[in-house]
Amino acid sequence: MKFLLLLLAVIVLLWLVRSSLRPPAPRRDPRATQRPQPMLVCAQCGVHLPQSEALPGRGGVFCGAAHRAAFEQAHPE
């Protein structure tokens, strides 16, 4: 019984030491979170992507340079 109490005390002591050495978790500023972005549709393949990742082109917005080039080649002015 004495051994179990000693073992429990050592475990609690190690847990307290470990938690005191760990740096505190950084606090998140609720004002610093990103706002939701509008989702746009690629004119070539129809995939939805955030506005910040969309590439503008002659026929709309695209998910990548390859789709923009393919669309513009297939739809000349």
Image: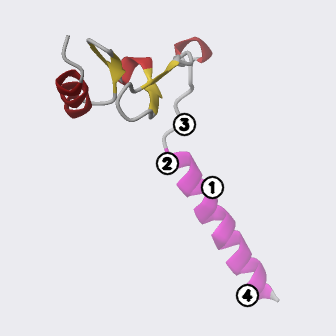
Who is closer to the viewer here, 74 or 44?
74
In magenta segment, residue 52: no
Place of residue 57 in the rendered image (x, y in percent of width and height, measured from the top left): 26, 14
Image point (20%, 33%), residue name: 66
- Quarter of the image with the C terminus is top left
Q: Residue tagged by mark 1?
A: 16
Taking the view exactly as shown, the residue that stands out farthest to the right is: 1
Looking at the rendered structure, the kind of residue marked 1 is Leu
- Residue shown at 78% from the left, 86% from the top: 2
**Where in the figure is residue 74, as x and y percent of width and height?**
22, 27
Mark 4 = which residue? 3
Q: Earlier in the sequence, mark 3 or mark 1?
A: 1
Q: Secondary structure at mark 1?
A: helix
Mark 3 vs mark 4, foreground winner is 3
To which residue does mark 3 refer? 25
Q: To which quarter of the image does residue 25 belong?
A: top right
Counting residues from the start of the chain, the first of labels 2 and 1 encountered is 1
Residue denoted by label 2 = 21
SS at circle 3 = loop
Q: Which is nearer the N-term, disc 4 or disc 1?
A: 4
The stretch of residues the image draws in magenta is 2-22
CA separation in Å, label 4 and label 1: 20 Å
